[in-house]
Image: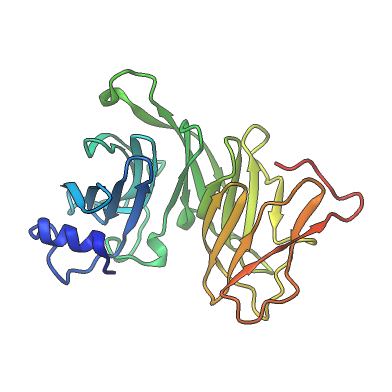
Amino acid sequence: MRNNLLDVHMITHRWFWAKGEMRAYMFTKFDPLTYIGHLFSDYLIVSIKHNMTSFENINVIGLDFSTFRIRAVDTHDSYGILIGYNHRSLYIAKLIHLDTLSIISSIEINDGYPQKIPNLFFYNSDSDLSISINPNGQVAVVGLPRANKIVFLKINRSDLFYQNWTIEITNRIVVSSSYAGFGRSVAWIDNVHLAVVVLNVPGSKSQMWFYNIEQSLSKPVFAYPNNQQIIQMFEAPLFFHLIFWSNNLFIVTNGENNLLIPACPPGFVSVWPTNTVDHYIISYRSEECIGGTYKKPI
């Protein structure tokens, strides 16, 4: 992967990133208000500020590459959470302060049982992880698809000094081994509603399950696809990644067609479009709900 962000990093910090060196994992975040971008790659974290004409204030930290690899990241305001593995195959969550690029705290989220994963420090489907921080920045959910589990982390930021901020496990959802890849991707819809990808469901392929964390976590409140929101493809796709913004949902799949489910007004539902020929992004269309099926939107 090559882009301006990477080129600046290679020129300024050539000892951190040799030209032509491959990275198994790369994740970027950009704040349009401060013009500060962050790049997370395996064990390197880069912070770059852009002044509208050029890059400035480039900072880099390197984690201990022999003991930790980043496999999922989310950020919120001045902090972020890194999810990855250590050298003992344990799932690790690290809280990072973005202004200083300093690790504030670190916890194991493995329940004490290491995962035996071959080629752990290389990117592969077995090492996939996911994370999403809710809009108010108080709770993060971590997807551990190999373990068919999601873990809820409370983010404690009440202390005036960021050095005293912590993260702790508060809850879990674990599903039967008859499913595969529960937690492949996770996304908050708002502060209480959560979408979770199940990569493979018996008799189907991928599904997306929706939970209300203020209700019972023993089962989802509904799932997609369903009787009204169907997928009319010759072969059902696998869901790899969810992106949620302004009540719109974008699903990255394993095929040529990705799915966009836009927000609908009350009394309407997003349904499969009538024309999908040569569309790399299939956008659902809005249609009135079938009589008796409308529910208050979450």
Residue 143 x %, y %: 48, 50
In the rendered structure, the answer to whether residue 155 lies left or right of residue 36 reads right
Place of residue 100 in the rendered image (x, y in percent of width and height, measured from the top left)? 21, 35
Above or below, comparing residue 88 to residue 287 in the picture: above
* Residue 144 rendering spot, x and y as whole percentages: 46, 51
Camera-side residue: 74 or 149?
A: 74
| Residue nearest the observer in this picture, 199 or 103 | 103
Does residue 297 appear left or right of residue 293 in this picture? left
**Residue at x-position 84% and y-position 47%:** 294
Q: Residue at x 50, y 55 (%)?
A: 185
Question: Quick check: can you spot residue 241?
Answer: yes
The quarter of the image holding the N terminus is bottom left
Q: Position of residue 82 (x, y in %)?
A: 33, 45
Q: Is residue 188 left or right of residue 112?
A: right
Left-right relation of 225 to 137:
right
How is the protein colored in the picture? Answer: rainbow
Q: Is residue 190 above or below residue 56?
A: above
